[in-house]
Image (spheres, helix red, strand yellow):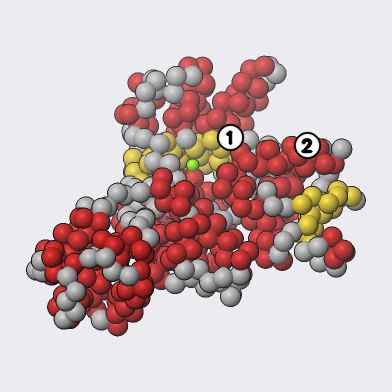
């Protein structure tokens, strides 16, 4: 019976935390028992247990409770016998309350239920890394979060998947909640809006529905493209929207594209959405990705000080993994999981091995040939020189640089790279990569060369 609850919880988790997280963290858990509100699991290492608790504990409990599990805490032990000793600290009552409430989030007034969805604790302004691609969206979100007089209404945020729209909306909600606890702030997805609307229709509670939504101070609707083509939901959304704008209440909307590009959206809604401030989140660039990775590493390290990852590996990830920040985070999480399971330091090789599927999916397809040609142009040497046995500095350095770039920008192995450079041994390539990495931190000319070449190759 309890086994069954866990089985179904696992299925549900695949959908809510993503397949990568599921495979890395949930799959290896061994369910032991569910007794007196404690769900007990066996784990391979203490690190894994801590990690699962910290990152997915709430969600696991939420799912188990949804299935009638009556769980109020989780316990992880490294082996079954030790289960009694390594019981994990119980959740704080506040967290417990959120975990058990699956639909409603009481954000402000505990005496009423607002129609919003729960907010992710991690999605705060503190944890949002600002770079060129998102600085405008961030600045607009900050302004709205100050809660002053409404200056643009709605704020419309749009951008591709995984670029931080939901993160920014939650950050606004957290900040407003902190600054002005009396405000009624409601965040929900357009999909949830639709379900609540349908439910209200079915239960003949449209008056309540209307009243509820018209009485909020700040309304945030995420992924509004979802209601395109759903006519009666759009209609209701439009009325809610107008009623709130008339009362000068702030509205924040997100979508995966600009209002004008959402097919199936009524013209009157489209134009109303454009009244306010429309800002987009651009695809991430290398610098932003690196910044985000560095921030994540610092967060991990504050919990797990012995985790060691070199700048070179971070640069590699920022380089090779595409725009979607969620994918980037997933890669880092997986890397840390591997490192902790095998107890090894994270190297470039290990990153390439353990992330092969992700890397392949976001391969930028820079070829060895391009790397060699551009490097030759850059240093004014001949291709034949790179292949030759010549070892003078003015030839050897460009060759090492090209090998380094080949390792960073392609998925070629050391031996493969060696073969392309006049049949050199893989140890020569390893040496070259190390040499450039070392020089980059000491010699600003070398680091500039590497940076410029990388940009040229990426363009
Ligand atoms: P979207 O809603 O645009 O699809 P999310 O807001 O869900 O994207 O972001 C996806 C993941 O990437 C989240 O875990 C989020 O915290 C993270 N993320 C996105 N942008 C940033 C950023 N600028 N700084 C830190 N984390 C970010
Ligand atoms: Mg989102």
Whether the residue carrying mark 1 lies under 8 Å from ligand 2 is answered with no
Dot 1: within a 10 Å radius of its alpha carbon, few (fewer than 14), some, or many (20 or more) residues? some
Pinpoint residue 47: horizontal percent, then vertical percent. Answer: 67, 65
Is any part of residue 322 visible from this angle?
Answer: yes
- Residue 275 appears in which quarter of the rendering? top left
In primary-sequence order, the first of circles 2 and 1 is 2
Q: Which mark is residue 67?
A: 2
Whether the residue carrying mark 2 lies under 8 Å from ligand 1 is answered with no
Q: Identify the residue shown where x is 62% and y is 27%.
A: 196
- Residue 369 appears in which quarter of the rendering? bottom left
Q: Is residue 280 left or right of residue 372?
A: right
Number of numbered labels in the structure image: 2
Is any part of residue 129 visible from this angle?
Answer: no
Above/below status of 133 relative to 47 = above
Q: Is residue 364 left or right of residue 378?
A: right
Taking depth in this image into account, of 377 and 69 the one nearest to the observer is 377
Taking depth in this image into account, of 137 and 160 the one nearest to the observer is 160
* Residue hosting label 1: 215
Task: Look at the numbered discs 2 and 1 and tell me whether their residues touch, using CB distance below 8 Å.
Answer: no
**Callout 1 secondary element:** loop
**Image quarter in which the N terminus is found:** top right
Above/below status of 130 relative to 273 = below
Which tag is nearer the camera, tag 2 or tag 1?
2
Dot 2: within a 10 Å radius of its alpha carbon, few (fewer than 14), some, or many (20 or more) residues? some
Taking depth in this image into account, of 351 and 16 the one nearest to the observer is 351
């Amino acid at each position: 019976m309890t086994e069954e609850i866990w089985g179904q919880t696992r299925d549900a988790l695949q959908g809510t935390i993503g397949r990568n997280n599921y495979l890395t963290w949930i799959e290896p858990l061994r369910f032991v028992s569910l007794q007196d509100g404690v769900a007990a699991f066996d784990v391979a290492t203490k690190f894994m247990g801590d990690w699962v608790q910290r990152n997915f504990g709430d969600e696991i409990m939420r799912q188990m409770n949804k299935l009638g599990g009556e769980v109020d805490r989780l316990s992880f032990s490294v082996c079954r016998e030790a289960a009694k000793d390594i019981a994990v600290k119980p959740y704080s009552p506040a967290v417990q309350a959120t975990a058990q409430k699956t639909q409603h989030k009481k954000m402000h007034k505990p005496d009423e239920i607002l129609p919003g969805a729960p907010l992710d604790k991690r999605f705060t302004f503190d944890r949002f890394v600002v770079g060129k691609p998102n600085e405008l969206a961030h600045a607009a979100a900050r302004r709205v979060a100050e809660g002053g007089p409404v200056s643009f209404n709605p704020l419309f945020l749009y951008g591709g998947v995984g670029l931080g729209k939901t993160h920014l909306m939650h950050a606004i909600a957290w900040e407003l909640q902190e600054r002005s606890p009396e405000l009624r702030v409601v965040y929900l997805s357009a999909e949830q809006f639709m379900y609540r609307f349908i439910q209200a229709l079915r239960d003949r509670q449209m008056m309540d529905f209307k009243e509820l939504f018209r009485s909020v101070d700040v309304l945030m609707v995420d992924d509004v493209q979802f209601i395109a083509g759903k006519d009666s939901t759009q209609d209701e959304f439009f009325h809610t929207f107008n009623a709130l704008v008339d009362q000068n209440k702030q509205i924040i909307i997100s979508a995966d594209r600009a209002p004008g590009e959402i097919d199936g959206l009524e013209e009157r809604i489209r134009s109303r959405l454009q009244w306010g401030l429309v800002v987009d989140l651009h695809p991430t660039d290398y610098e932003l990705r690196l910044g985000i990775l560095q921030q994540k590493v610092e967060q991990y390290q504050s919990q797990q000080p012995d985790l060691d990852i070199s700048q070179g590996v971070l640069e590699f990830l920022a380089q090779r993994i595409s725009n979607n920040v969620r994918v980037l985070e997933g890669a880092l999480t997986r890397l840390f999981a591997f490192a902790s399971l095998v107890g090894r330091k994270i190297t470039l090789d290990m990153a390439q091995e353990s992330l092969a599927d992700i890397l392949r999916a976001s391969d930028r397809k820079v070829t060895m040939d391009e790397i060699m040609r551009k490097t030759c142009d850059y240093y004014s040497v001949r291709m034949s020189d790179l292949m030759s046995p010549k070892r003078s500095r003015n030839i050897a350095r460009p060759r090492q640089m090209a090998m380094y770039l080949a390792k960073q920008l392609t998925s070629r192995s050391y031996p493969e790279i060696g073969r392309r450079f006049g049949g050199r041994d893989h140890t020569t390539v390893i040496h070259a990569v190390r040499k450039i990495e070392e020089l980059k931190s000491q010699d600003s000319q070398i680091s500039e060369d590497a940076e410029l070449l990388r940009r040229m190759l990426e363009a």
